[in-house]
């Protein structure tokens, strides 16, 4: 998950801003000065993990241009909101899959949709509150338990 990475980046001495674009592929890190950024760079690379590379040249300019043109780049405080956007998309897809297989009236469909959204949000909150996850694969491992909680809501 991105929140712990952004938290680590934000805690590096000299770093004044750390953000990520919505795919999670590109990070923006700013510092008090060019010298502070140079001093922070080893810790930044460590926080980003193996395989992280410093964008330069055309790649750097392309990312900075997108950011200055209004593309959203998220801070650590914004990441939970981004997770909720993803959660709503997943909840809609899952509700559509269920209602394609089972005939439900409008009220029942809305109950399933809300239960699905609530349980996905609860799983996302838990992941954020416990320090994040190393891979998005955690969600699919959690999915059977999410489904059980959705069914429990429907049984009430």
Image: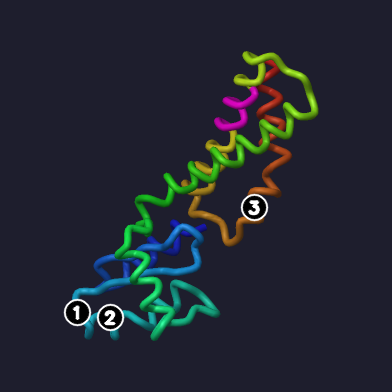
Q: Provide the secondary structure element on which disc 2 rests.
A: helix
Q: Looking at the image, do the residues carrying marks 2 and 1 touch, with CB atoms under 8 Å apart?
A: yes
Quarter of image, res 114: top right
Q: Tell whether position 43 is magenta.
A: no
Q: Residues within 10 Å of mark 2 (few under 14, many from 20)?
A: some
Q: Is residue 8 above or below residue 111?
A: below
Q: Provide the secondary structure element on which disc 1 rests.
A: loop
Give how far apart the Cα atoms at labels 3 and 1 are: 38 Å
Task: Return the x and y of residue 71 as percentages of the image width and height.
Answer: 37, 58
Q: Which mark is residue 138?
A: 3
Quarter of image, res 152: top right
Q: Which mark is residue 37?
A: 2
| Mark 3 or 1, nearer chain start | 1
Give how far apart the Cα atoms at labels 2 and 1 are: 6 Å
Name the residue: 64% across, 48% down: 139
Name the residue: 42% across, 44% down: 81
Give how far apart the Cα atoms at labels 2 and 3 are: 33 Å
Residue tagged by mark 1? 33
Magenta residues (range): 112-118
Q: Residues within 10 Å of mark 3 (few under 14, many from 20)?
A: few
Q: Is residue 49 above or below residue 38?
A: above
Q: Tell me the quadrant of the picture where the C terminus can be found.
A: top right
Name the residue: 64% across, 15% down: 106
Q: Residues within 10 Å of mark 1 (few under 14, many from 20)?
A: few
| Mark 2 or 3, nearer chain start | 2
Q: Nearer the viewer, residue 91 or 120?
A: 91
Q: Looking at the image, do the residues carrying marks 2 and 3 touch, with CB atoms under 8 Å apart?
A: no
Task: Return the x and y of residue 134 as percentages of the image width and height.
Answer: 58, 61
């Amino acid at each position: 998950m991105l929140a712990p990475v952004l938290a680590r980046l934000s805690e590096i001495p000299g770093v004044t801003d750390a953000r990520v674009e919505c795919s999670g592929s590109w990070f923006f890190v700013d510092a008090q000065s060019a010298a502070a950024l140079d001093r922070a760079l080893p810790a930044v690379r460590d926080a980003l993990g193996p395989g992280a590379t410093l964008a330069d040249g055309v790649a750097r300019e392309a990312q900075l241009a997108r950011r200055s043109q209004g593309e959203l780049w998220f801070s650590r405080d914004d990441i939970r909101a981004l997770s909720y956007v993803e959660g709503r998309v997943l909840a809609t897809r899952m509700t559509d899959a269920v209602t394609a297989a089972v005939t439900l009236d409008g009220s029942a469909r809305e109950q399933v949709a809300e239960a699905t959204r609530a349980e996905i949000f609860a799983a996302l909150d838990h992941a954020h509150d416990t320090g994040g996850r190393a891979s998005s694969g955690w969600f699919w491992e959690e999915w059977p338990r999410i489904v059980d909680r959705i069914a429990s809501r429907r049984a009430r």
